[in-house]
Image (spheres, rainbow, N blue to C red):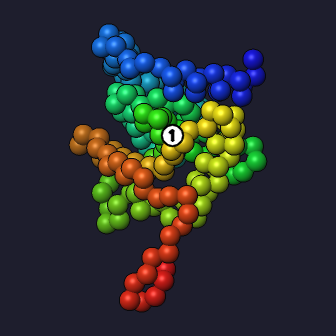
């Protein structure tokens, strides 16, 4: 079975699955509670091994933010299909691809270590939205036509990992669409 057939089978199972029982949800939440601290411990251990080149802090924070959102979506009952999805045909990636009910969501995660003057979700500018749309189209084309979802949307989730504070996030559902909309103001279009 090749990867396309496996993906087709997985999507078919997820779209036809009955609602999870309370026991299944409890088991999932138990595993999350067990594995999340283990992941943090391994990350800390890898960073402190002598001779291992440590990635820049902003990349570490970005990865932690994506992990936080991944586990959050799992707890909320979303079906995460892919993490850091890439296409060999284009440059870029989609942080998370998930099913919210029957809606396929392409999720961009923006992580910040402080609440600066500009909110994190505004970092998804026009060029980033264009790249995400291209990647979204490529992802949809990788799914067999008869299994493609009817509804899709682009979400942006801003995660704030501030030292000394609890991790917080802002979810912006349907943050932008498939087409760039021109906005007008008294100063002209922008």
The residue furthest left is: 165
Residue drawn at 42 percent across, 33 percent down: 101
Q: Nearer the viewer, residue 167 or 109?
A: 109
- Determine whether the residue tagged by mark 1 lies in a helix, strand or loop: strand
The quadrant in which the N terminus is found is top right
Residue with the mark numbered 1: 104
The residue furthest bottom is: 187
- Measured from the top left, where is residue 138 in percent x and y? 68, 46
Is residue 187 positioned above or below 9 on the image? below
- 53 left or right of 162 in image: right
Residue drawn at 48 percent across, 50 percent down: 154
- Categorize mark 1 by other alpha carbons within 10 Å: few (<14), some (14-19), many (20+): many
- Measured from the top left, where is residue 161 in percent x and y? 33, 44
Q: Give the quadrant of residue 4.
A: top right
Is residue 99 positioned above or below 59 on the image? above
- 40 left or right of 52 in image: left
Specify whether residue 58 is in view.
no
Is residue 21 positioned above or below 83 on the image? above
- Measured from the top left, where is residue 24 in percent x and y? 37, 12
Q: Nearer the viewer, residue 167 or 126?
A: 126
- Measured from the top left, where is residue 25 in percent x and y? 34, 17
Residue drawn at 54 percent across, 31 percent down: 81
């Amino acid at each position: 079975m090749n990867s396309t057939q496996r993906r087709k089978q997985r999507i078919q199972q997820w779209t036809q699955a009955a609602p999870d029982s309370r026991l299944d949800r409890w088991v999932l939440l138990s595993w999350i509670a067990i594995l999340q601290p283990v992941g943090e411990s391994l990350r800390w251990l890898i960073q402190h091994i002598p001779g291992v080149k440590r990635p820049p802090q902003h990349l570490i924070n970005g990865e932690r933010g994506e992990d936080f959102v991944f586990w959050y979506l799992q707890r909320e009952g979303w079906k995460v299909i892919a993490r850091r999805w890439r296409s060999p045909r284009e440059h870029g990636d989609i942080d998370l691809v998930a099913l919210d009910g029957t809606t396929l969501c392409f999720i961009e995660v923006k992580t910040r270590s402080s609440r600066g003057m500009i909110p994190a979700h505004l970092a998804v500018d026009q060029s980033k939205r264009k790249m995400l749309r291209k990647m979204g189209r490529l992802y949809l084309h990788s799914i067999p036509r008869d299994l493609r979802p009817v509804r899709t949307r682009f979400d942006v989730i801003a995660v704030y990992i501030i030292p000394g504070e609890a991790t917080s996030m802002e979810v912006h559902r349907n943050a932008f669409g498939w087409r760039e909309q021109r906005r007008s103001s008294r100063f002209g279009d922008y």
